[in-house]
Amino acid sequence: MPAVAPPPYPIPEPVVSQCVATASRTYGVPELVIRSILKVEGGQVGTMSRNTNGSFDLGPMQINTINLKIINKEYPFLTWRHITYNPCVNIMVGTWFLKSKIRNRGGVIWEGVGDYHSVTPSKRSVYLQRFLGHYNRLKKQYGFTPARVQFTQPAEPVQFAALSDERAVPTMPIPAMLARTSVSASTKDAGKPTPSFAAFR
């Protein structure tokens, strides 16, 4: 990590909208779920939060450096700088990582969200309560309905431009290498009121 890093800054909302929409379309994770995790994590472009074990949580979705080896197996061209300073890359990688957790839980979003943070029950519980609070608030704001992830063949690849300035706020399109593995989402019980945790079952 650099001795002196540029100060973190929030992602402009138009960029959030573009990046979240593309990540949702590419990996089949509902936009509302991605936005809720962004709220819970509370990271910004350039955020590097040091943990007690010496690892760092990077960028808006606070991707832990412990996971860089896993990420680099899928995306070997990425560095921690891309993940820290490029908000769309951060959101795409974070969503890809979340999608893998959801898949490991049989497509149950609620369980995957918990695993995104921790497999320790006490830590999961606190995280999921915070997530649910943001989810319900954002649901009222945007009117999105909960969905269950279903895995299909990859969608058409996202067109891309090469990564150039790692610290620049990118505009669409984003790197296509992040879109190699795609899933799609379908609405579950659309239009029906869903109480609390049941929205993710």
Image: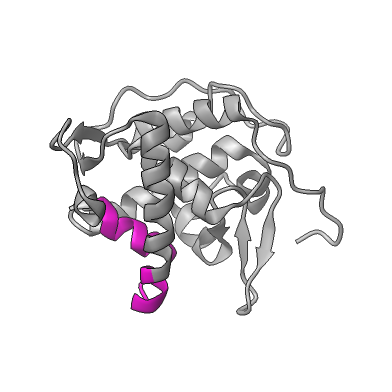
Q: Which image quarter: residue 63?
A: bottom right
Q: Residue 53: x percent and y percent? A: 60, 79
Q: Quadrant of the N terminus?
A: bottom right
Tell me, yes or no, whether the highlighted magenta stretch contains residue 116: yes
Relative to 12, is 138 on the left or the right? left
Q: Which residue shows up at 26% across the image and 35% down it?
A: 145
Q: Which of these two is toward me, 157 or 188? A: 188
Mark yes or no: residue 133 visible. Answer: yes
- Relative to 107, say whether 157 is above or below: above
Q: Which of 181 and 47 is in front in this view?
A: 47
Q: Which residue lies furthest to the right in this view?
A: 4
Write the residue at 59% across / 29% down. Answer: 13
Q: Say if residue 75 shows up in the picture.
A: no
Foreground residue among 87 and 174: 87
| Majority secondary structure of magenta residues | helix
Q: In this view, does 51 lie above or below 140?
A: below
**Residue at horizontal 37 percent and vertical 62 percent from the top:** 128
Q: In which quarter of the image is residue 197?
A: bottom left
Report the number of numbered marks: 0
Q: What's the magenta region?
A: 109-125
Q: In this view, does 10 lie above or below 176?
A: below
Is 178 positioned to the left or the right of 53 in the image?
left
Image coordinates of residue 100 in percent, x first then y, are: 32, 52
Q: Does the magenta stretch include residue 52?
A: no
Q: Residue at x 54, y 55 (%)?
A: 41
Q: Position of residue 192 (x, y in %)?
A: 15, 36
Give coordinates of residue 103: x percent, y percent: 24, 52
Q: Which colour scheme is used?
A: one colour
